[in-house]
Amino acid sequence: MYQKIVIRNVGVLKAFDAGASPPLSELSLFYARNGRGKSTLTAVMRAARDGCSTTVMARRSLGNNAADPEIVLVSSGGSQSFKNGRWAHQRATIEVFDSTFIADNIFAGEMTELDHDRGLFSVIIGEDGVRLANLLRRFNGHAKNAATRLKDAETALQDDLPTDINQVEFFALAPNPAYAQRLDKAEKTLKAVQQSDKLALLASLDKIALPALPSDLHKIMAATVPTIDAAARARLAEHFRHFKLGKNGEAWVNFGLEHIEDDACPFCGRENADELGFVTLYGQIFGEEYKNHMTRISEAMDVLDDATGDEARSAIIASIAQNAELAKKWGQYIRVDADLPGLATLAADLGEAHANAKALLERKRSSPLEIIEDLDAVAALGGAMLRAETALEGYNVIVDAINLASKGATAAATMSVDAARQSVINARRRIARTQDPGVQRRVDAYLAAKRSDERAKKARTKTQAALKAANEAAADHYHLRVNHYLGQFGVGARITRPTNSMAGNAGQADYALLIRGEQIVRGRGRVADAMPSFRNTLSTGDKTTLALAFFLAKLDHDGNLASKVVVFDDPLSSHDSHRRGKTVEAIKQLCGRCLQLIVLSHDEYFLRDVEKRCAGTSTATYQIDYSDGDQWSDAKHVRLSDLCASDHTRRIEKLASYSDHSTGDPDDVVLHVRQVLETHFRRSYTAYFPHNRNLGKIVRDIDSYIGAHPLAGAVRDKLDFLNASTCDNHHGDDAEVTPKKGVDSDELKIIVTEALELIGARRPPE
């Protein structure tokens, strides 16, 4: 609670000191005529509340040699001071109702503007709401800055992100050898796209098939001619032995058989010939079945030569060379995990297999009727073919892979150059993600910005929810309490439930008027006169009463009101007698609810009513007025009863002072005697005297009254004496007689005493 207010060099308050004797109290009332500094004092209190230096400096006293303002608000909890152009505290717990409150929050010039909506928003949501609104604005700023940083970080990452994966996948990339392979493949694909005309001319690789040996080689080696008579074979063999023909004898005899003409054999008739003749013997041995047997041997040798002979092997070597050349060319456009083998030993293996198989067949042809069983030769043949088969299997797997990749490259060559180039870029970005420190820094910056953005959004969302809840509760409160006060003050209008919003990142409040069942929008600015609005549907008194209702509702909503000082500056603007009384009652209701109540007014009778209505509350009363005839205001302690005393009371006090202490100017006092007597008897005997009767006519009215006049007798005689004693001083001078100079003080004292006794203002001596 403030005990003393000291103001230097602010407006007309050049050396203002309120509360010296006595100090300010729980209820402090200030009376001042217009222009004495009431509004300045109120502005100082508001500036202390807001910690605003501009308000004070803008009211620097003029004509005072530009002296710096100084303010000290002394309170039981410590002083708040303004010096060197700034307040030494952040914010005082003060609430102020004055014309500025109305102009800032309700209306100005009888119109409402956007600023009023914003000001009213702060009023409605209260200090906690304002704190939340300010917090929300700050969080909105944080969120905006965080979003900007996130966008910048995201922009910085654009050249690092592959287009074929999302951010999360990109951030999760780890070192992987496959990225290099992907890059190689992408680069080759790009080259294929760029050289699609050359690519179209490239052929696929040919698979190299394993040469097929005669399928019945083993059967041929083991085959003979089972239908030949065993005895004939023996005899023929003996014949060959006898002539030492050896194994060639069989071929020789077979050759001779082909030259038989007319059953005459060129060999027949020789010495020691069988009695049956060679013709018969040869017919038994070398028949069709034998010839077929020999044909199978010859055909097997042909198959062997075709499959693994020199020409066949040369063709295979040529195909391998051609494949190698094609593979080299395709290698510019495709990637294969394994290189194409050179098959350096394939020709040797096939040659070895051919030689072994040929040798076996030669032996068989030389001895077609013998079963050839050469295990070493067969094993060598099988080993060579197995090696060749194994080599060709691996070779052909790679050929298939190259051909498959080449088909893919051919298909990919139909894509655009830009798409192929982007694939290369994507592959390089995968590698850079794990190898380039700059990319990692940009990723870290983005993730940090994202976390900051998420925190800011979360804080903003949480604050928005809290502010919305506060708005809803406040809207209900103001709807109820403002309408309550409007009813108390006798205003015919009501308001709708206020709506609050944070449009444009600034709080705004809105409501409509309800008048005789119709809803009237307030309208911003000067709306058309033909349309009902705030401006033309409420009287001036209704508008100020509405503002006061909002202020009182604000105090009702303030949970910290018990620790606050509440200031009212002239709350009676355009109020009639009913609203005047309700204003006094509203102020009375605040006594005890707030820490201190300060009321300033130019109406001393209003302040007197407040003092009387708040009986029981410690009160201090002051008058702000020019000091010592100077144009600078000061405050002095006064009694409101003195300020509000009637002229009649003041005159009686002057007469009593003269009677008791001879205080006052006799020429002035003597005039008061007649005025006191006339006022007293006019008021006390209204049935007998008109309201404007002077003292002489009152005496004559008593004398001329028909019947018993209540003042007849001693009272009438004293009135006549007092009239006669003062009439010369009341009327103008006799032009023909020199008047007596001055009034005899001793005589006047007797006249004054008798007049006081006559009206009961002084008891006669016992």
Image (cartoon, grey):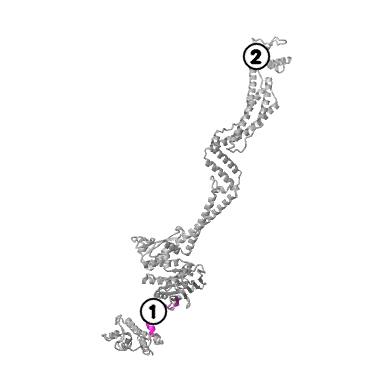
Callout 2–callout 1 Cβ contact below 8 Å: no
Q: Amino acid at mark 2?
A: Glu
Taking the spot 29% from the left edge, 81% from the top edge, the residue there is: 690
Q: Position of residue 398 (x, y in %)?
A: 61, 35
- CA gap between label 2 and label 1 equals 175 Å
Which label belongs to residue 766?
none
Dot 2 crowding, Cα within 10 Å, few <14, some 14–19, many 20+: few
Mark in the foreground, 2 or 1: 1
Dot 1 crowding, Cα within 10 Å, few <14, some 14–19, many 20+: few
Question: In the rendered view of the protein, which quadrant contains the C terminus?
Answer: bottom left
The residue that mark 1 highlights is 645
Is residue 269 highlighted in magenta?
A: no
Q: Amino acid at mark 1?
A: Ala
Q: Position of residue 693 (x, y in %)?
A: 30, 82
User: Which segment is the magenta one?
Assistant: 634-656
Q: Main secondary structure of the magenta part?
A: helix
Q: Is residue 440 above or below residue 200?
A: below
Taking the spot 63% from the left edge, 16% from the top edge, the residue there is: 288
Q: Seen in the image, is 257 located left or right of residue 665? A: right
Q: Is residue 476 above or below residue 610?
A: above
Which label belongs to residue 258?
2
Q: Position of residue 422 (x, y in %)?
A: 54, 43
Q: Which type of secondary structure does the marked residue at label 1 adopt?
A: loop
Is residue 637 highlighted in magenta?
A: yes
